[in-house]
Amino acid sequence: MEDEGRTSARAALVAALDVVGAAPSERFERIVRVAREVFDVPLSYVNVLDDDLLHTLTPNVPDEIVSGPVGWSFCQLTIRQVEPTVICDTTADPRTAGLPGVTNRGIRFYAGVPLTMPGGVPVGTLCLMDTRPRDFSLADEAALIDFGRWAERALGQGLHHDRLQDVVAALTPAPLGVGDLHVSATSVPYGDTSGDLHDWSTDGQHLTVTLADVMGKEQPAAILAAGIRSALRQHRDRAPEDAVRAVEPAVAEDLVAASAFATLFHARVTLGTGAVEAVDAGHGLVVHLGADGRHRMLRSHDLPLGLHPVGAARSVTTVTLAPGDALLVASDGALDLGDGTIDTLSALTRTFERTRDHHAFLETVRLRAAERAEDDVTVVLLTRDA
């Protein structure tokens, strides 16, 4: 009998894989399709098993039942051991002769291999079935094990996705209020991960706020963005010009090696006065919204990281956030939320003005980005109390 803790761990992993009840996926269908051809069998399945039920991810025939009690399955035997389970004649084996697959479906041959996830926890099986008894050689078993490793990698993509989301969540700063300043953001990746980064921190005298947008999408851009975030965090106690000067040589080297560049808005606000110093490296998507409803764009006069001449000075933008003012900073994906032009930022500021509420505004941006954007979208909102 299986250890109770082991089965509970299996159920938790199966839930994390997020494959039960999903539509058939080509990543699993291809495995069983090739397996049927290689082993010349009519039926092949990728299954996952929780504490009570077996769920097949690859139904072989229309309207096939995709879930059933573990105790009715051949795979209850496979999940208990490391090596493949091979039953050349199911009617001659007392473990399987009375199973519904034999008595109702006429299954006479079964071979299965367990599928395990990191930590060695078995979560499912890859199995072959036939309606006639047959032999299965050691070479066949070795080939079945190889197919099992293929299926494990396909299953692991679900865990990989979840792990990515965990990392992204861990690196996403929570809304922050310090003194009369409040900063929050929304970031909607075009895929699983984003080439945008936003970050902020405070040393008790200043609030430092960063938004960068790396050219490209998904993991390559996200890796470069993470490097920029880490580099700037090491110098978050320095004025923006000094911080960018310190990190730019190494960051630019990485970007050039990857044939990429990154726009950057890196600002520091003095608590109590609202005085802002910022370096804008080719970003230019920043709006200063006054308490009276007037707003102006803060333009960039420098090239992005990776394109700016090495050693050349950076311009410093200064502005003061008076009580009731706001600063809106967006990645270029936010332009997809409007007509694709800079006028979109004006439209976003008008949206904020209608509520003057961080959460309501950013939720509106998030919903619109999920519906319309074709790029990573990040919007950072910094406000000073009236």
Image (cartoon, rainbow, N blue to C red):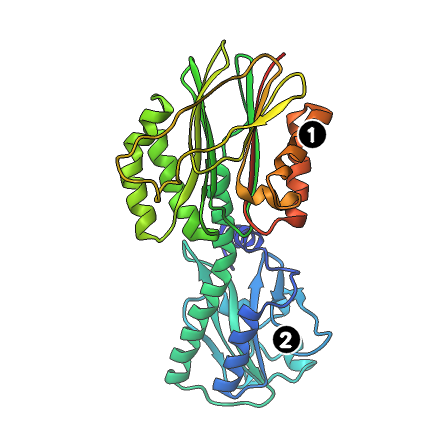
- On the image, which quarter does residue 66 sit in? bottom right
Where does label 2 land, which residue?
99
Q: Is residue 166 above or below residue 101?
A: above
Horizontal placement of 115 versus 180: left or right? Answer: left
**Which residue type carries mark 1?**
Arg
Q: Are marks 2 and 1 in contact (CB under 8 Å)?
A: no
Residue extending furthest toward the top? 272
Q: Going 48% across and 52% down the picture, which residue do you hit?
A: 217
- On the image, which quarter does residue 361 sit in? top right
Rendered location of residue 352, percent (x, y): 67, 28
Where disc 2 sits, the SS reads loop
Q: Going 40% across and 86% down the picture, which residue do you hit?
A: 137
309 or 275: nearer the eye? 309
Rendered location of residue 198, percent (x, y): 48, 35
Q: Is residue 193 above or below residue 174?
A: below
Mark 1, Cα crowd under 10 Å, few <14 / some 14-19 / many 20+, is some
Mark 2, Cα crowd under 10 Å, few <14 / some 14-19 / many 20+, is some
In primary-sequence order, the first of circles 2 and 1 is: 2
Q: CA distance from mark 2 to mark 1?
A: 67 Å
Where disc 1 sits, the SS reads helix
213 or 14: nearer the eye? 213
Horizontal placement of 68 versus 9: left or right? Answer: right
**Which residue type carries mark 2?**
Leu
Rendered location of residue 5, percent (x, y): 50, 49
Horizontal placement of 49 versus 205: left or right? Answer: right
